[in-house]
Every structure is written in C-alpha cells, then in structure tokens.
Image (spheres, helix red, strand yellow):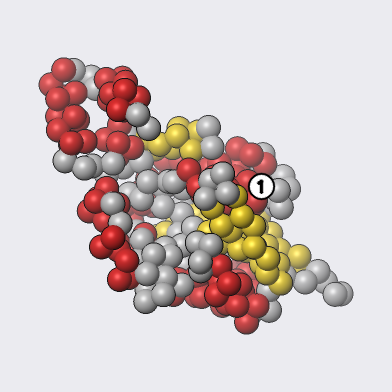
Amino acid sequence: MFAEDEARLLIGAAPTPTDLAAMVDRRVAGVPLEQIVGWADFCGLRIAVEPGVFVPRRRTEFLVSQAAALARPHAVAVDLCCGSGAVGAALVAAVGRLELYAVDIDPVAVRCARRNVGSAYVGDLYEPLPTRLRGRVDVLVANAPYVPTDEIGLMPPEARLHEPRVALDGGTDGLDVQRRVAAEAPRWLAPGGHLLVETSERQAPRTVEAFSRHGLTARVARSDELNATVVIGSTPLTGD
C-alpha cells in the first residue's frame, strides 16, 4: 500500500486531529495499519482487527478461494487457528449459508473473531469443538502458524513485535501445528471431507507427507499471483 493510501485511511478513521496525530505516531512506531484503523480489507470484506491480533494477509485469500470451491451451502465448516475470523467470514460470504465453527487458542483473537463471525471457541485446535461434529466436518481450514522458530527474528517488525507469537511460530521446522492438525483431522472430517492448510512452497512437500501419513489424499495448489501455497487433503468417500 502506498503512503498516500495509508494517509487517507488514517484520516478517515480519526475522529479528531488529536486522534489522527496519535494514530500517525503509532504507525511511525511500526504498529500495523490494520490494528490502528481497526479493520483489514480481506476478500472484499471489512474484517475487524484489534491490537495484538494477527492481521489477515492477502495471500490467505487463496486459501479461501480453494475452500469455497469445495464447500456447498449448508456444509459444516471449521476454521482452526482462526485469528480474527477472516477466513471463516470470507468463506461464508463466498459460499452462502454454512454451519461454521471457529477456534483459536488466543482469547484476544477469539474476542475479535466473534465480531466477524458471530461465535468462536477458545481452545487448542480441536479441543473446544462439540464432539457431535466428529465425522461431520465437510471443510476444515487452518491458517496455522508455519514460520520456523529461528526465522521469527527475520520477520518485519510489524509482525514480530505487534502480532502474537503463537500465531507465527510453527516450531523448529514450521510444521509442528500443521502436523497436529493433520493427525486429528480424520476423526472430524466427513467421508469425502477436505482439510486445507496454508503453507509455504518450500514446506509443502513435508506438509503433504504429514497429510498422507494420516490417510488423507493430498495435493498442492499454488497461486503465483498471491505467492500462496495451500495443501488440500481429502478423506475417501464411503465405500471407496
């Protein structure tokens, strides 16, 4: 985004000149613009974003488009590691009526997600989900953290200083949370259900291995335009 665009957004969000000056100071200090103005543009939606909450990236719009292509109205969808709830909100907007469940381990993120999707659960991955969903989830999306621990320090200050580490740090090789998501997914997915995880192009082969290890048929989808990579795993249909 150009400086002129940022200035216009700050001016539009500031109630008074004093507020504007304070907002400009925060931006100069490196606070993400979205946390300052209180929202992010994601898939054409205005997603509420609070201070300290992970800011949805444009590349993650590819995860939404891939999930939307597999979801039907009234399907059961789960948004793990939901953060602000941007992926779930955009999925509902793209598909229509869904039975959506959103989960994040960070209470601040869940509070924000509730503003965007209506309801969300606080907890570690599948732990807070109703047990009645086991074997019923049609589409499971997870924008889980996938930055290797040693690379957190290389990230822009906006991310490493102002977003929760739990939303960034994926462990030694970046795949710790993805492996946990894949390991439990077959218990929750319906026959013919799909698990979609955002990852990097470099990490995708190991994400595929994790999916395959737990019985999911996996493939990689890539958008060069958005520099986005998504691994999609599917469970067999009944009788296959």
The vertical placement of 156 against 130, above or below, is: above
- The amino acid pointed to by label 1 is Ala
Judge from the rendering whether residue 120 lies leftward or rightward of residue 217; answer left or right: left
The image quarter containing residue 214 is bottom right
From the top left corner, tell me how far across and down residue 125 is, in percent. Answer: 47, 67
- Residue at 24%, 22% in the rendered image: 14
Q: Nearer the viewer, residue 59 or 100?
A: 59
Percent from the top left, x then y, of residue 56? Answer: 43, 46
Mark 1 residue crowding within 10 angstroms, few (<14) / some (14–19) / many (20+): some
User: Pointer 1: what residue?
Assistant: 68
Q: Residue at x 50, y 47 (%)?
A: 59
Question: Would you identify the image quadrant in which residue 8 lies?
Answer: top left
| Left or right, residue 18 beside residue 137 | left
Q: Is residue 176 left or right of residue 36?
A: right
Q: Residue furthest right?
A: 239
- Residue at image point 40% right, 36% down: 40
Local secondary structure at mark 1: helix
Say which residue appears at 19% left-offset and 23% top-offset. Answer: 20
Q: Position of residue 60 (x, y in %)?
A: 51, 49
